[in-house]
Amino acid sequence: VVTGADRIAANGDTANKIGTYSLAVLARHHRVPFYVAAPFSTIDPALPSGAGIPIEERDPAEVRCVGGRQIAPLESPVYNPAFDVTPAALITAIVTERGVFRAPYRF
């Protein structure tokens, strides 16, 4: 499996579109290598781990409505993240234009 990343922490945790973490878990379960390909500029050495990556939330209406019809009350709490964080432990390697990096990451 090869995926991208919008941000990479110093420890190798990555943030990418929602569903990337689930894909990494499935890859690990089935013993399939999981690679992240991203520009080197995506790496943030000042960010120790993925815990510090702010996760953008999408419009709650995307969850409360289907096909233009409201399916849940407006006051229903909704968590609709646009991104998720994949822990470095699930990543086989990070591929950039400067090379391939494996844990322990030293970018």
Image: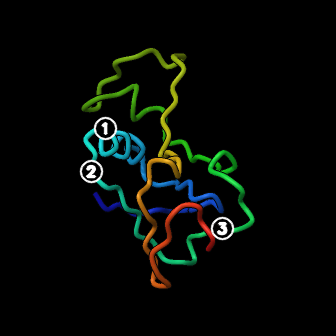
- Residue at the location (29% across, 25% down)? 69
Q: Quadrant of the N terminus?
A: bottom left
In front here: 18 or 72?
Answer: 18
Tag 1–tag 3 contact (CB < 8 Å): no
Secondary structure category for the residue under label 3: strand
| N-term-proximal mark, 2 vs 3 | 2
Query: Quick check: 67 left or right of 107?
Result: left
| Cα separation between marks 1 and 2 | 8 Å
| Cα separation between marks 2 and 3 | 27 Å
Which image quarter: residue 2?
bottom left
Which image quarter: residue 71?
top left
Extreme residue toward the right, this view: 46
| Cα separation between marks 1 and 3 | 28 Å
Q: Is residue 67 above or below residue 74?
A: below
Secondary structure category for the residue under label 1: helix
Three-letter amino acid code at the position of disc 1: His
Three-letter amino acid code at the position of disc 2: Val
| Structural crowding at the residue carrying mark 1, measured as other residues with C-alpha within 10 Å and reported as few (<14), some (14–19) or many (≥20) | few
Q: In this view, does 92 lie above or below 78?
A: below
- Which disc number belongs to residue 29? 1
| N-term-proximal mark, 1 vs 3 | 1
Query: Quick check: 52 left or right of 97?
Result: right
| Structural crowding at the residue carrying mark 2, measured as other residues with C-alpha within 10 Å and reported as few (<14), some (14–19) or many (≥20) | few
Three-letter amino acid code at the position of disc 3: Asp
For disc 3, the marked residue is: 44
For disc 2, the marked residue is: 32
